[in-house]
Image (tube, rainbow, N blue to C red):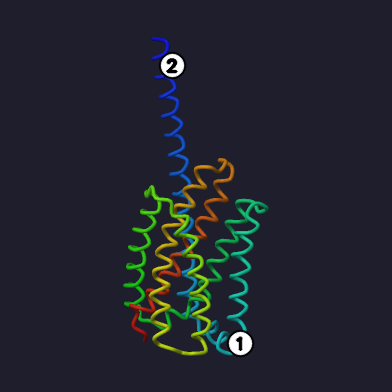
Amino acid sequence: MYTNDYNRDSYDISRQSQAALANTVSSAMKRVYFKMTLALVVTALTALWASSSYGYLSFLASHTWMMWVLIAAELGLVFTISGAINKLSSVAATALFYLFAVVNGLMLCTVFLAYSPAAITKTFFITAGTFGAMSVYGYFTTNDLSKVGSFLFMALIGLIIASVVNIFLHSSTLDWIVSIAGVLIFIGLTAWDTQQIKTMAMNMPADSIGKLATVGALSLYLDFINLFLYLLRIFGNRD
Protein backbone atom coordinates (compact mmCIF):
# COMPACT_ATOMS: atom_id res chain seq x y z
CA MET A 1 0.00 0.00 0.00
CA TYR A 2 2.82 2.37 0.90
CA THR A 3 4.55 1.56 -2.36
CA ASN A 4 1.39 2.33 -4.34
CA ASP A 5 0.92 5.60 -2.45
CA TYR A 6 4.54 6.53 -3.13
CA ASN A 7 4.22 5.75 -6.82
CA ARG A 8 0.99 7.72 -7.02
CA ASP A 9 2.57 10.73 -5.29
CA SER A 10 5.61 10.56 -7.57
CA TYR A 11 3.35 10.40 -10.60
CA ASP A 12 1.33 13.42 -9.39
CA ILE A 13 4.52 15.43 -8.75
CA SER A 14 5.88 14.51 -12.17
CA ARG A 15 2.61 15.48 -13.83
CA GLN A 16 2.54 18.79 -11.98
CA SER A 17 6.15 19.49 -13.01
CA GLN A 18 5.34 18.74 -16.63
CA ALA A 19 2.27 20.97 -16.47
CA ALA A 20 4.32 23.80 -14.92
CA LEU A 21 6.99 23.42 -17.62
CA ALA A 22 4.34 23.43 -20.35
CA ASN A 23 2.84 26.62 -18.91
CA THR A 24 6.28 28.26 -18.77
CA VAL A 25 7.04 27.37 -22.39
CA SER A 26 3.58 28.49 -23.52
CA SER A 27 3.96 31.81 -21.71
CA ALA A 28 7.43 32.36 -23.21
CA MET A 29 6.23 31.61 -26.74
CA LYS A 30 3.30 34.01 -26.35
CA ARG A 31 5.75 36.75 -25.38
CA VAL A 32 7.92 35.91 -28.38
CA TYR A 33 5.02 36.12 -30.83
CA PHE A 34 3.66 39.28 -29.22
CA LYS A 35 7.01 41.08 -29.49
CA MET A 36 7.51 39.84 -33.05
CA THR A 37 4.02 40.97 -34.11
CA LEU A 38 4.45 44.39 -32.49
CA ALA A 39 7.81 44.80 -34.24
CA LEU A 40 6.20 43.96 -37.60
CA VAL A 41 3.55 46.62 -36.95
CA VAL A 42 6.26 49.16 -36.06
CA THR A 43 8.16 48.31 -39.25
CA ALA A 44 5.03 48.53 -41.43
CA LEU A 45 3.97 51.90 -40.00
CA THR A 46 7.49 53.30 -40.30
CA ALA A 47 7.81 52.11 -43.91
CA LEU A 48 4.38 53.49 -44.77
CA TRP A 49 5.27 56.89 -43.29
CA ALA A 50 8.68 56.96 -44.98
CA SER A 51 7.22 56.03 -48.38
CA SER A 52 4.76 58.93 -48.16
CA SER A 53 7.26 61.49 -46.84
CA TYR A 54 8.55 63.63 -49.69
CA GLY A 55 11.28 65.05 -47.45
CA TYR A 56 12.60 61.65 -46.44
CA LEU A 57 12.50 60.25 -49.99
CA SER A 58 14.23 63.37 -51.32
CA PHE A 59 16.91 63.01 -48.69
CA LEU A 60 17.51 59.36 -49.67
CA ALA A 61 17.63 60.26 -53.35
CA SER A 62 20.20 62.98 -52.81
CA HIS A 63 22.22 61.14 -50.15
CA THR A 64 22.69 57.58 -51.41
CA TRP A 65 25.15 56.88 -48.59
CA MET A 66 22.22 56.95 -46.17
CA MET A 67 21.15 53.45 -47.25
CA TRP A 68 24.58 52.14 -46.27
CA VAL A 69 24.24 53.86 -42.90
CA LEU A 70 20.89 52.15 -42.38
CA ILE A 71 22.34 48.77 -43.38
CA ALA A 72 25.27 49.24 -40.98
CA ALA A 73 22.84 50.27 -38.23
CA GLU A 74 20.74 47.16 -38.82
CA LEU A 75 23.74 44.84 -38.68
CA GLY A 76 25.06 46.58 -35.59
CA LEU A 77 21.73 46.26 -33.78
CA VAL A 78 21.33 42.57 -34.70
CA PHE A 79 24.84 41.72 -33.51
CA THR A 80 24.39 43.77 -30.34
CA ILE A 81 21.08 42.15 -29.42
CA SER A 82 22.22 38.63 -30.25
CA GLY A 83 25.82 38.85 -29.03
CA ALA A 84 25.43 40.97 -25.91
CA ILE A 85 22.03 39.75 -24.76
CA ASN A 86 23.46 38.45 -21.45
CA LYS A 87 24.99 41.86 -20.71
CA LEU A 88 21.85 43.81 -21.55
CA SER A 89 18.84 44.24 -19.34
CA SER A 90 15.55 42.89 -20.66
CA VAL A 91 14.27 46.47 -21.12
CA ALA A 92 17.40 47.55 -23.02
CA ALA A 93 17.27 44.50 -25.30
CA THR A 94 13.60 45.13 -26.04
CA ALA A 95 14.24 48.82 -26.78
CA LEU A 96 17.05 47.92 -29.21
CA PHE A 97 14.80 45.39 -30.90
CA TYR A 98 12.09 47.96 -31.58
CA LEU A 99 14.74 50.46 -32.70
CA PHE A 100 15.83 47.81 -35.20
CA ALA A 101 12.21 47.50 -36.35
CA VAL A 102 12.13 51.27 -36.98
CA VAL A 103 15.42 51.25 -38.90
CA ASN A 104 14.22 48.31 -40.98
CA GLY A 105 11.04 50.21 -41.76
CA LEU A 106 13.11 53.13 -43.04
CA MET A 107 14.92 50.65 -45.28
CA LEU A 108 11.79 48.90 -46.55
CA CYS A 109 9.90 52.03 -47.53
CA THR A 110 10.96 51.39 -51.15
CA VAL A 111 8.70 48.31 -51.14
CA PHE A 112 5.66 50.60 -51.12
CA LEU A 113 7.09 52.47 -54.08
CA ALA A 114 8.07 49.42 -56.15
CA TYR A 115 4.96 47.27 -55.67
CA SER A 116 1.24 47.87 -55.78
CA PRO A 117 -0.78 47.84 -52.53
CA ALA A 118 -2.71 44.82 -53.81
CA ALA A 119 0.51 42.87 -54.41
CA ILE A 120 1.87 43.79 -50.97
CA THR A 121 -1.39 42.81 -49.24
CA LYS A 122 -1.68 39.52 -51.13
CA THR A 123 1.93 38.60 -50.41
CA PHE A 124 1.57 39.54 -46.74
CA PHE A 125 -1.29 37.09 -46.26
CA ILE A 126 0.59 34.37 -48.14
CA THR A 127 3.59 35.01 -45.91
CA ALA A 128 1.51 35.03 -42.73
CA GLY A 129 -0.15 31.72 -43.63
CA THR A 130 3.12 30.04 -44.59
CA PHE A 131 4.97 31.40 -41.58
CA GLY A 132 2.19 30.37 -39.22
CA ALA A 133 2.03 26.82 -40.57
CA MET A 134 5.79 26.30 -40.34
CA SER A 135 6.03 27.84 -36.88
CA VAL A 136 3.27 25.53 -35.64
CA TYR A 137 5.12 22.59 -37.19
CA GLY A 138 8.37 23.64 -35.53
CA TYR A 139 6.64 23.94 -32.17
CA PHE A 140 4.83 20.61 -32.17
CA THR A 141 7.08 18.33 -34.19
CA THR A 142 8.99 15.65 -32.29
CA ASN A 143 11.64 15.48 -35.03
CA ASP A 144 15.01 17.02 -34.24
CA LEU A 145 15.55 19.82 -36.76
CA SER A 146 19.12 20.65 -35.68
CA LYS A 147 20.72 18.98 -38.73
CA VAL A 148 18.25 20.77 -40.99
CA GLY A 149 19.17 24.04 -39.32
CA SER A 150 22.88 23.53 -40.00
CA PHE A 151 22.17 22.81 -43.66
CA LEU A 152 19.90 25.86 -43.95
CA PHE A 153 22.56 28.17 -42.54
CA MET A 154 25.06 26.93 -45.12
CA ALA A 155 22.42 27.40 -47.82
CA LEU A 156 21.78 30.93 -46.50
CA ILE A 157 25.45 31.80 -46.93
CA GLY A 158 25.27 30.52 -50.50
CA LEU A 159 22.14 32.58 -51.05
CA ILE A 160 23.87 35.75 -49.87
CA ILE A 161 26.84 35.10 -52.14
CA ALA A 162 24.57 34.45 -55.14
CA SER A 163 22.63 37.64 -54.42
CA VAL A 164 25.83 39.71 -54.29
CA VAL A 165 27.08 38.15 -57.54
CA ASN A 166 23.78 38.91 -59.26
CA ILE A 167 24.14 42.58 -58.41
CA PHE A 168 26.83 42.64 -61.08
CA LEU A 169 25.39 40.01 -63.45
CA HIS A 170 21.81 41.33 -63.53
CA SER A 171 20.62 37.83 -64.50
CA SER A 172 16.84 37.42 -64.39
CA THR A 173 17.27 33.63 -64.28
CA LEU A 174 19.60 33.79 -61.29
CA ASP A 175 17.27 36.28 -59.63
CA TRP A 176 14.40 33.82 -60.03
CA ILE A 177 16.49 30.97 -58.60
CA VAL A 178 17.60 33.12 -55.67
CA SER A 179 14.00 34.12 -54.94
CA ILE A 180 12.76 30.51 -54.88
CA ALA A 181 15.75 29.37 -52.83
CA GLY A 182 15.19 32.23 -50.39
CA VAL A 183 11.57 31.20 -49.87
CA LEU A 184 12.53 27.58 -49.22
CA ILE A 185 15.38 28.51 -46.87
CA PHE A 186 13.30 30.85 -44.71
CA ILE A 187 10.38 28.42 -44.62
CA GLY A 188 12.79 25.90 -43.11
CA LEU A 189 14.41 28.43 -40.79
CA THR A 190 11.02 29.41 -39.42
CA ALA A 191 10.39 25.85 -38.25
CA TRP A 192 13.95 25.44 -36.97
CA ASP A 193 14.01 28.76 -35.09
CA THR A 194 10.66 27.97 -33.47
CA GLN A 195 11.93 24.62 -32.22
CA GLN A 196 15.13 26.25 -30.94
CA ILE A 197 13.20 28.90 -29.03
CA LYS A 198 10.92 26.27 -27.51
CA THR A 199 13.93 24.18 -26.44
CA MET A 200 15.63 27.19 -24.85
CA ALA A 201 12.41 28.10 -23.03
CA MET A 202 12.32 24.60 -21.54
CA ASN A 203 15.86 24.86 -20.18
CA MET A 204 16.24 28.55 -19.35
CA PRO A 205 15.78 30.06 -15.86
CA ALA A 206 12.54 31.94 -15.35
CA ASP A 207 14.34 35.26 -14.83
CA SER A 208 15.85 35.01 -18.33
CA ILE A 209 12.58 34.48 -20.20
CA GLY A 210 12.28 38.19 -21.00
CA LYS A 211 15.62 38.19 -22.83
CA LEU A 212 14.73 34.94 -24.56
CA ALA A 213 11.49 36.52 -25.78
CA THR A 214 13.45 39.37 -27.38
CA VAL A 215 16.06 37.17 -29.06
CA GLY A 216 13.38 34.72 -30.18
CA ALA A 217 11.20 37.52 -31.52
CA LEU A 218 14.18 38.91 -33.45
CA SER A 219 14.86 35.52 -35.06
CA LEU A 220 11.25 34.97 -36.11
CA TYR A 221 10.89 38.61 -37.19
CA LEU A 222 13.85 38.21 -39.55
CA ASP A 223 12.39 34.95 -40.88
CA PHE A 224 9.05 36.62 -41.55
CA ILE A 225 10.51 39.73 -43.21
CA ASN A 226 12.85 37.78 -45.47
CA LEU A 227 10.16 35.27 -46.40
CA PHE A 228 7.85 38.19 -47.26
CA LEU A 229 10.47 39.92 -49.41
CA TYR A 230 11.35 36.79 -51.38
CA LEU A 231 7.69 35.93 -51.91
CA LEU A 232 7.07 39.51 -53.02
CA ARG A 233 9.75 39.13 -55.69
CA ILE A 234 7.84 36.10 -57.00
CA PHE A 235 4.20 37.15 -56.66
CA GLY A 236 4.43 40.92 -56.59
CA ASN A 237 3.51 43.06 -59.57
CA ARG A 238 5.82 46.03 -59.78
CA ASP A 239 4.24 49.45 -60.30
Image check: 77 left or right of 5?
Answer: right
Instruction: From the top left corner, tell me how far across and down residue 35 is, in percent.
Output: 49, 56
Relative to 29, say whether 18 is above or below.
above
In the image, what residue occupies the spot 41% across and 19% down? 7
Disc 2 element:
helix
Foreground of the two, 90 or 19: 19
Image check: 76 left or right of 98?
Answer: right
Instruction: From the top left corner, tell me how far across and down residue 52 is, in percent.
Output: 46, 80
| Residue sticking out furthest to the top | 1
Relative to 126, say whether 85 is above or below.
above
Residue type indicated by callout 1: His
In the image, what residue occupies the spot 61% across and 80% down? 68
**Foreground disc of the pair 1, 2:** 2
In the image, what residue occupies the spot 45% across and 25% down? 13
Instruction: From the top left corner, tell me how far across and down residue 118 is, in percent.
Output: 32, 77
The residue labelled by disc 1 is 63
Few, some or many C-alpha atoms within 10 Å of disc 2 (few <14, some 14-19, many ≥20)?
Answer: few
For the image shown, how many numbered marks are present on the structure? 2
Foreground of the two, 191 or 37: 191
